[in-house]
Image (tube, coloured by chain):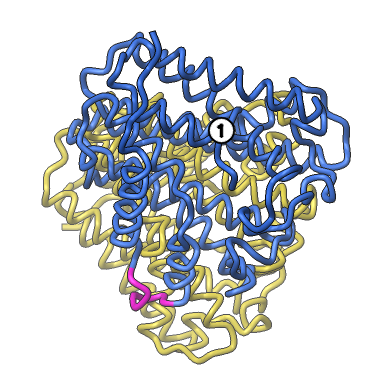
Chain colours: A yellow, B blue
Amino acid sequence: MSIPRDPGFASRLEGWQVRVEAELAARLPGSEVHPTRLHEALRYSVLNGGKRIRPALVYATARSLGLAESAVDGAACAVEFIHAYSLVHDDLPAMDNDDMRRGRPTCHKAFDEATAILVGDSLQVLAFQILATGHGLPKDPAIRLRLVELLAEGSGTGGMAGGQAIDLAAKGTALNISEVEEMHARKTGALIRASVLMGAYCDANLQRDVAQALDRYSRDIGLAFQIQDDLLDVEGDPKLLGKATGADQANNKPTYPAVAGVDASRKKMQELHASALDALEILGPAAAPLASLSDWLVLRRH
Amino acid sequence: MSIPRDPGFASRLEGWQVRVEAELAARLPGSEVHPTRLHEALRYSVLNGGKRIRPALVYATARSLGLAESAVDGAACAVEFIHAYSLVHDDLPAMDNDDMRRGRPTCHKAFDEATAILVGDSLQVLAFQILATGHGLPKDPAIRLRLVELLAEGSGTGGMAGGQAIDLAAKGTALNISEVEEMHARKTGALIRASVLMGAYCDANLQRDVAQALDRYSRDIGLAFQIQDDLLDVEGDPKLLGKATGADQANNKPTYPAVAGVDASRKKMQELHASALDALEILGPAAAPLASLSDWLVLRRH
């Protein structure tokens, strides 16, 4: 058997992007609220038309399990706030020192470093706060507490923050394939996994074997996504990407193609994609949105 | 009526400091766990013999309500992790640019700036993670979710992070008394309030009027604590404080004594102390630990 695709996926994805943009905007303090400069910087850093991949994972998982979007809006915003905070902090001079992101100045360039540090700190609070206050989430406190746990797992030293530490330490050193995989699994994979599992755990009737299958799906697409990211930096179209290619190599960043070669990387990505689709079998045709999302992640050109 | 004091308070306070030190150490990833440098920096930044005022507030509140220490250990650690993260980020060059804290190099001096940013980020995750996983806390998920909400309120832009933004923006500008009070209420007051209320909400039978009284107590001692901090910087003993005095004035920091004068500040502090004790009346003699804690906070010489 093979999971069918979602024929309306492209427009659905666009719908989720519009939806989460409005949800994020509504959950951020207004830029007229004191302290205004900090709130302005928060909105600047989040409401910038990102691809919203992590919210899309939350919504696609919910749809595959038959949950309404309104049951997972809070989870979609929480993962995106964490992702947005990580970009603001990663861009800081002491970290990756990036002046531009998505065609405009990074937060510390548009505002200042102190504000950028506080923006990241505040976005992280917002992410957890949303899960506690519960608007756009299941009412059951046990479910929402589980979401807090999953988000913390994905973003702490065992996840995203630990991955960034490994990445910083690895600049200019030679990692082997399993070390690169572990770095990727933490730095980007952990939050992608949290996105899928948070969507899944909003289902009060989630079965253990389904949870396990979605866990595998999320790990597979997490690494596939990052390999594709690495490949696009090697052979992508700068016009489509909106940024120069070759940055990873120039910065001595350990990447999958740098360690395994381009052909082996592409092969690994296809294997992970196939394995992710295989994991979805347990859900049958209902998993079409997640199958289409996996296609989109590995076939994307930017 | 007047609340009696806790005759064993001094040794009890020391007991709480020892207790929370062990709890914090047990909840931090070991420094041998990968990525080791980040985990080493986490432990360096937290396990440094601080006064542990916020955990003491959690324990004192619990004791005044008849709760066991083991029912609030998680809350005590969570507030201290948030406090520790705020110190690490506030010390950064882009913020207060402090090289030393408690007699040893600050995190970014002992390690590096990128690590210090990640340490703060990771400590914040740990704080929320503890509340979700629930070791040393009531089992009821609704209570733990309320703790997440209280901690987020205390640390976000309406609380600590917002206060730091106001503080940074205020350097060298003239604030009036109510602006200084608002800055203090957010920057230090909000987390002190969260500490008391998190201790209180661990009580499944917490009465509404008791919660309101403790809220008032926490707001009063929060501002009293900060005024005393400001006063010690003006007229404290550098030997007892372990740091030079006059730093606030040298840095053009808005402080209560700078705006209201030393005498009026001392008077205000005593009024707040009296008001805090007054709020405790509802609990009767059981509130002795909180009364003693308030004495300690406003009478301390360092």
User: Is A33 situated above or below A271?
Assistant: above
The answer to whether residue B32 is magenta is yes
Instruction: Characterize the magenta stretch by its predominant secondary structure.
Output: loop
Closer to us: A261 or B134: B134
The answer to whether residue A242 is magenta is no
Please report the residue visible at 47 percent of the width from the left and 68 percent of the height from the top. B44
**Of the residues shown, which amino acid type is indicated by label 1?**
Val
User: Is A235 situated above or below B153?
Assistant: below
Report the magenta residues as a range.
Answer: B30-36
Mark 1 Cα-neighbour bin, 10 Å: few <14, some 14–19, many ≥20? many
Taking the image as drawn, is residue B66 in sight?
yes
Q: In the picture, which quadrant includes the N terminus of chain B?
A: top left
Residue at disc 1, secondary structure: helix
Closer to us: A83 or A33: A33
Give percent across and percent down for residue A73: 42, 32
Q: Which residue is mark 1?
A: B298
